[in-house]
């Protein structure tokens, strides 16, 4: 499920599987998708098995092309069609701390743009975000990007990193966050009562 911030008419279309539309989109032709991850990883093996079963009704054959060396280069070299990886947190659990820098992952030609996604409109929005500090302008730019990205779907988050957050009853403003920033995302607002 998507968070309150992610939910809305654009994301709602993906909440329920629609094999009939998927079959129609591929015009009833067989489609094989090679998917891989760096083995061994039992959690990702189970994820691939679930994806395989979910795609069958749509006429999509999923081939598990996993090896011990599967990675971003395998995707770039055409050895697989889909890479399942935690590349969204590639800079570590602390991220870069900059949403502008993190946004560059979808910029044409960026080394972290594993899907090879290219859209001049998104490139322009990312360039504007990199130099914009006005919160209203940032919100407008993000609003402009959302429908483009929900239409193109250049990457697909399959799940979030679940965490358990424990805090003292005397600590306030600590909030869970399933993103790569973890619970420290708002550390500047934490308050410890005596």
Image (tube, grey):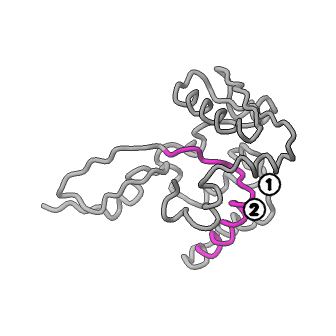
Per the image, label 1 sits on a secondary structure element best described as loop
Mark 1, other Cα within 10 Å: few <14 / some 14–19 / many ≥20: some
Q: Where is residue 8 in the image (x, y as percent from the top left)?
A: 58, 67
Q: What element carries label 2?
A: helix
Q: Position of residue 107 (x, y in %)?
A: 73, 55
Residue in the image at 74% along x and 30% along y = 74
Task: Give the residue drawn at x 60%, y 73%.
Answer: 138
Horizontally, is 13 left or right of 41 in the view? right
Q: Do the residues labelled 2 and 1 touch (CB within 8 Å)?
A: yes
Residue 22 versus residue 124 in the image, above or below: above
* Residue 185 magenta: no
Q: Name the residue under label 2.
A: 123
x, y percent for residue 73: 74, 32
Image location (x, y in percent) of residue 137: 61, 77
Residue 189 sits above or below residue 86 on the image: below
For the magenta stretch, what is the residue range?
139-160
Q: Residue at x 25, y 51 (%)?
A: 167
Q: Toward which corner of the image does residue 76 lie, by quadrant?
A: top right
**In the picture shown, does residue 37 fall above or below 150?**
above
Q: Quadrant of residue 185?
A: bottom left
Q: Name the residue under label 1.
A: 118
Q: Distance between the residues labelled 2 and 1?
A: 8 Å
Q: Is residue 153 left or right of residue 191?
A: right
Q: In this view, does 187 lie above or below 63?
A: below
Q: Is the magenta stretch mostly helix, strand or loop?
A: helix
Sequence-first tag of 2 and 1: 1
Answer whether residue 144 is magenta in the image: yes
Q: Which residue is drawn at 77% across and 53% down?
A: 108
In the image, 146 versus 15, the foreground residue is 15
Q: How crowded is mark 2: few (under 14 residues within 10 Å), some or many (20 or more)?
A: some
């Amino acid at each position: 499920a998507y968070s309150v911030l992610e939910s809305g008419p654009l994301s709602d279309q993906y909440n329920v599987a629609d094999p009939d539309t998927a079959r129609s989109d591929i015009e009833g032709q067989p489609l094989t998708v090679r998917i891989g991850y760096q083995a061994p990883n039992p959690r990702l093996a189970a994820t691939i098995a679930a994806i395989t079963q979910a795609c069958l009704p749509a006429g999509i054959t999923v081939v598990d092309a996993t090896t011990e060396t599967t990675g971003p280069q395998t995707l770039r070299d055409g050895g697989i069609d889909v890479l399942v990886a935690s590349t969204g947190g590639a800079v570590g659990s602390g991220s870069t701390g900059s949403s502008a820098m993190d946004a560059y992952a979808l910029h044409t030609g960026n080394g972290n743009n594993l899907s090879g996604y290219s859209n001049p409109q998104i490139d322009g929005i990312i360039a504007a975000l990199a130099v914009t500090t006005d919160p209203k302008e940032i919100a407008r730019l993000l609003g402009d990007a959302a429908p483009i990205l929900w239409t193109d779907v250049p990457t697909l988050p399959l799940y979030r990193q679940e965490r358990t957050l424990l805090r003292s009853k005397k600590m306030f403003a600590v909030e869970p966050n399933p993103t790569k920033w973890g619970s420290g995302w708002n550390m500047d607002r934490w308050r410890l009562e005596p």
